[in-house]
Image: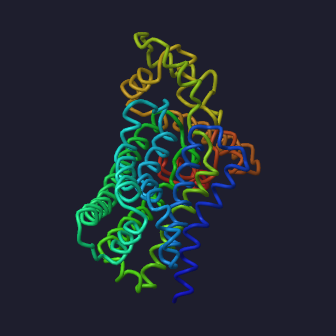
Amino acid sequence: MEEFKSAALLFSFFAPSSWTISLLLSGMYKTAEKKHLIFLLLGATIAYILTYAKFEGHLQFYTSFFTIQALVVPLLFPLFYLYFKIITSEKMVYNWKYYIHFVMPLTLSFAYFVVSKIWMDSEEESKFMFSILHSHPESGTKFVFGYYLYSFGRLYYLASSIFYLLLITRCYSRYKALIINIFPSDQTKELNWIKGVGILFLAVAIFNTIIHYMRNNDLASQNALIAFSYITFGSFFWIIGLFGFRQPQIYNIEVVEKTELFPSNIRISKEEIHDYLQNSKAYLNAEINIYHLCNTFKTNRTYLSAEINNQFQKNFRTLINSYRIEEAKSQIVSAKKKNQIISFEQIASDCGFNSYSSFLRVFKGAEGISPSEFYKTY
């Protein structure tokens, strides 16, 4: 089990570090979301190499860089939240509120530095680290203050994991509600992988609670708990790295900013929207989104979304997909009348769906039967 624990600790370091290197070598660090992903993975890399040193007995190395770990560990959850917020936001989120998330980790790290590197000499620092690792505070003002500071840091880390889990959940719910008014069904926009990450995030929070409430000297003997905990941590960052690496940019920021400049007081009728879609057949374009219509009608996204919802009693996604389904039905009927061999995959592509599975799901949701059943019953 000792070897299993060591392997798990190495995996928790390898998972984020490998994706950090991949992102840097691929040149993807030039976009804002990929920069934040690299910062997140780099922070995890630093945190887990120091954790490896802690559990494998390299205490001198761990002591030397403890203040760095005290900084990067509390930063991991806010960095993940901010990364997710950036990839799901129409506009850049850089403002004063953005930096609030870094205040407490920076404050804690600075406090650790003052206590262990300035207030204490090297011998006292070693005794202090020994005391917190064995959950046995030394007597004396410096040691007692340092121990309470360490205990506060642990409580803050636990509280922040729960806090940021709630923030990410809220952010994801808002995003899901927003994109149905912007994009038709598109798997690259759905971010379904976040659900799996969310489950792992919860597991990480649970393991963190167990680990942080156990005394360090008791924890050191729990090889199985350490192993499974750090396999979970490593898996969490491996999945973030994998899907973050693959995730394309959701919004074209230049297009968003351009359409935001359009006025919101232009009256657009239901007939105008219908005639445009019917005549141009813009819905057949798999890449269509509401910004295309904003450019056509010279109005902003917020206003046009509201008009579509009010006038059609449908969101943008449902509206576009309704035209696509009517087109698909027309093609199926035409092919049957001509006794032609039919390819539902081709029809899905011709009608603007970017995947056959999306076509099946939307068709069955609209008609109550599958395309093949529609073909048979027509």
Label total for image: 0
The x and y percentages for residue 292 are 58, 24
Which residue lies at the image location 63% right of the left edge and 27% below the top edge?
281
Lateral position of residue 195 relative to residue 326, left or right:
left
**Which residue is more in the foreground, 319 or 204?**
204
| Left or right of 151 on screen, residue 258 | right
Q: Is 237 rendered above or below residue 269?
A: below
Residue 235 visible, this angle: no
Q: Image quadrant of residue 34? A: top right
Question: Which quadrant of the figure has residue 279?
Answer: top right
- 90 on left or right of 26: left
- Residue 339 position, x and y percent, is 75, 48
Answer whether residue 146 is visible to the viewer in this image: yes
Front-lying residue, 152 or 75? 152
Front-lying residue, 144 or 3: 144
Identify which residue is drawn at 62% across, 27% down. Answer: 282
Relative to 149, is 298 above or below?
Answer: above
